[in-house]
Amino acid sequence: MNKNNKLFLLLPVMFAFFTMGFVDLVGIATNYIKSDFALNDTMANLMPSMVFFWFLVFSVPTGMLMNKIGRRKTVLLSIVVTLLALLVPLLDYSFATMLVAFSLLGIGNTLMQVSLNPLVSNIVSGDRLASSLTFGQFVKAIASFVAPIIAAWALAKFGDWKTLFLIFAAIAVVAAVWLFFTQIEEKPVEGKQSTFGECFALLGDKTILLLFLGIMAHVGTDVGVNTTAPKLLIERLGMPLSEAGYATSVYFLFRTIGSFSGAFILARFSSKSFFWISILMMLVAVVGLYFSYSATAIYVCIALIGFGNSNVFSIMFSQALQHLPQRSNEISGLMIMGLAGGAVFPLLMGVLSDAMGGQIGAVIVLTALVAYFFMLAPKIGVKRHEPEARIES
């Protein structure tokens, strides 16, 4: 396959990465929904939980489906489900329908997370595969970054922030049609498909368990900051939501910068050193959130968390694969299940914030998540020398 043909095939796949980023609209949308329906933090933070719960349920079944219908068709299905999620609020806007919409968004994103990266491997390989996947994550981050900006613009221009859903729905249609008419030759699937039992049995390995919980903590931090940052600005500075929502864009801007620069940093420093640097940045930031009562200070803290949290997933994921390379299929499925942390910790932040009467409750949960990274750090970069007892499933 020549370079031009690869580019022709890669462009619609990269455009699909943009639709993958739609899932991160849940942060800014949660804040608007809270305001529109006068919800407390517990009920509002149920929204991101409805999105990320489905990673626990559908990660392994998606792999099985992908083996039957192929990777491209699975990605197409994921875009269609995402499109349905975006249309629901346009047809009827209520708390109940938004729960349905966010559930569909979570299911669609699970399908996409599992199938899109393997689809790229059918087009490029070797060193170009790593760079292509990194660029895909960069494209995904663009959607995460622009969502709050589009919502604020739509509110100012049309008086309705939900125009965001219409714009993203139109983009999803283009992505689906483009990929539908792009024929990609898929490599045959090798090896035995993982099952639920095989995936969960790996949690009997202490290192895998700690890394799985680390993935949950990473996504919990990601979604938690995404949801909490605007609330902090509203609570402490009295900002209108249309202005406070830019805090989410600041987070994703620095997360994008961190993801892009991480590839170069990790080429010069060990993953262990970079992991320590990343979590130290996050620690400084969450401690700062206890004392920050100016917009500048809060934005700096949010930016530090965004940069610090940008590469911990890839470091933990690769560490898990290196720990048990012979079980890479099961480990991959298990780590994707760990994205369900986005369902658990934001809900806990909402409950604690309501109990304490302010967003300090959410900051306490963020502190606990960062503290967990410090417990995990000694495991990073440690190579396994002796095989542990084989895990039966």
Image (tube, rainbow, N blue to C red):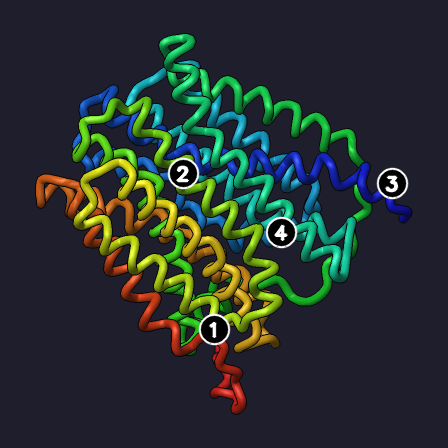
- Depth-wise, is mark 2 or mark 3 nearer the camera? 2
Badge 2 or badge 4: first in the primary sequence: 4
Please indicate, yes or no, whether residue 163 appears anywhere in the rendered image.
Answer: yes
- SS of the residue under disc 1: helix
Label 3 amino acid?
Asn
User: Label 1: which residue?
Assistant: 272
- Depth-wise, is mark 2 or mark 4 nearer the camera? 2
User: Around disc 4, counting alpha carbons within 10 Å, would you say few (fewer than 14), some (14 to 19), or many (20 or more)?
Assistant: some
Mark identifier at residue 134: 4
CB atoms of marks 2 and 4 within 8 Å:
no
Badge 4 or badge 1: first in the primary sequence: 4
Look at the picture and state if 225 lies above or below 265. above
Q: Position of residue 314 (x, y in %)?
A: 52, 60
Mark identifier at residue 312: none
- SS of the residue under disc 2: helix
Q: Position of residue 378 (x, y in %)?
A: 39, 78
* Residue ID at (47%, 72%): 273
User: Label 3: which residue?
Assistant: 4
In which quadrant of the rendered view does residue 112 lie?
Answer: top right
* Residue ID at (42%, 60%): 215
Left or right of 123, for residue 367: left
Left or right of 87, for residue 130: right
User: Label 2: which residue?
Assistant: 250
